[in-house]
Image: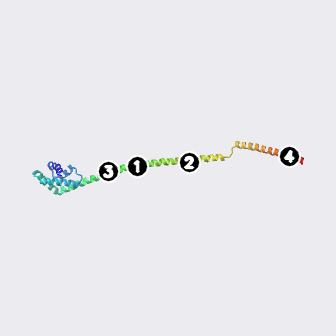
Amino acid sequence: MEKDVQEYLPYFLNEGHEYSVLGFFKHHNFTKKSLAHFALNKCLEYMSLSTDPELKSKAIEVKETLQDFKCKQDINNYWKSKNREKKKKTIETKIEIAEKKSKLCDAEQHVIVKRLVYKQDNDVRENFNAEIIKKREYNQDIEREQPISKSCKRKLKNSLEKTENNKIRLLGYQSENSELEDDEMMKIS
């Protein structure tokens, strides 16, 4: 600690005003109150035990200043503001981290939404395609069941007439044959 005390002493030698304690805290940029007061007490102890009259007088001045109510208030206000700044910085870093996380979450959600939309689009397309296929099949079934056109009817009628004519001829031929057979059978008997 003596090395540290040697580092802190020049400040007290150079500063001449009564609020040098605050200046001491600010100059060395202490982050913790306990560490700052510990260093200050060590410096004052070292200065009080020193053989140098200038250091002893400075130590007495600083101790008297520390007893002053206004100085105590200023020191407390300094540490309060320091704590506020620290809290503000931690809050800002937390906000930044939260924003980064939210941006990542937003990006992930965007990707998920994109996937869902794409998937939904695929489902929509598949459903649409299924509907189109059903409609085509239905239309084909209707076309198969549709009434026969006039030309088809004529063709069918003509073919039926031909078959009927053929049937009639066949029946006529068969009947002639049966008559002939009957005649022959009669002749034979």
90 displayed left or right of 5: right
Identified at 55% across, 46% down, the residue is: 129
Residue holding disc 3: 93
User: Which of the marked residues, 1 or 3, is nearer the chain's N terminus?
Assistant: 3
Task: Say which of marks 4 and 1 sits in front.
Answer: 4
Of residue 17 and residue 9, the one placed in the foreground of this image is 9
Q: How many marks?
A: 4
Amino acid tagged 3: Thr
User: Which of the marked residues, 3 or 4, is nearer the chain's N terminus?
Assistant: 3
Identified at 46% across, 48% down, the residue is: 115
Tags 2 and 1 touching, CB below 8 Å: no
Q: CA distance from mark 4 to mark 1?
A: 101 Å
- Image coordinates of residue 87 in percent, x first then y, are 28, 53
Give me the disc on residue 130.
2
User: Which of the marked residues, 4 or 2, is nearer the chain's N terminus?
Assistant: 2
Residue holding disc 1: 106
Residue holding disc 4: 181
Judging from the image, what secondary structure is the residue with disc 2 in?
helix
Crowd band around label 3 with a 10 angstrom C-alpha radius: few (<14), some (14–19), many (20+) = few
Amino acid tagged 1: Asp
Task: Say which of marks 4 and 2 sits in front.
Answer: 4
61 displayed left or right of 128: left
Judging from the image, what secondary structure is the residue with disc 3 in?
helix
153 displayed left or right of 2: right
User: Which of the marked residues, 2 or 1, is nearer the chain's N terminus?
Assistant: 1
Judging from the image, what secondary structure is the residue with disc 4 in?
helix
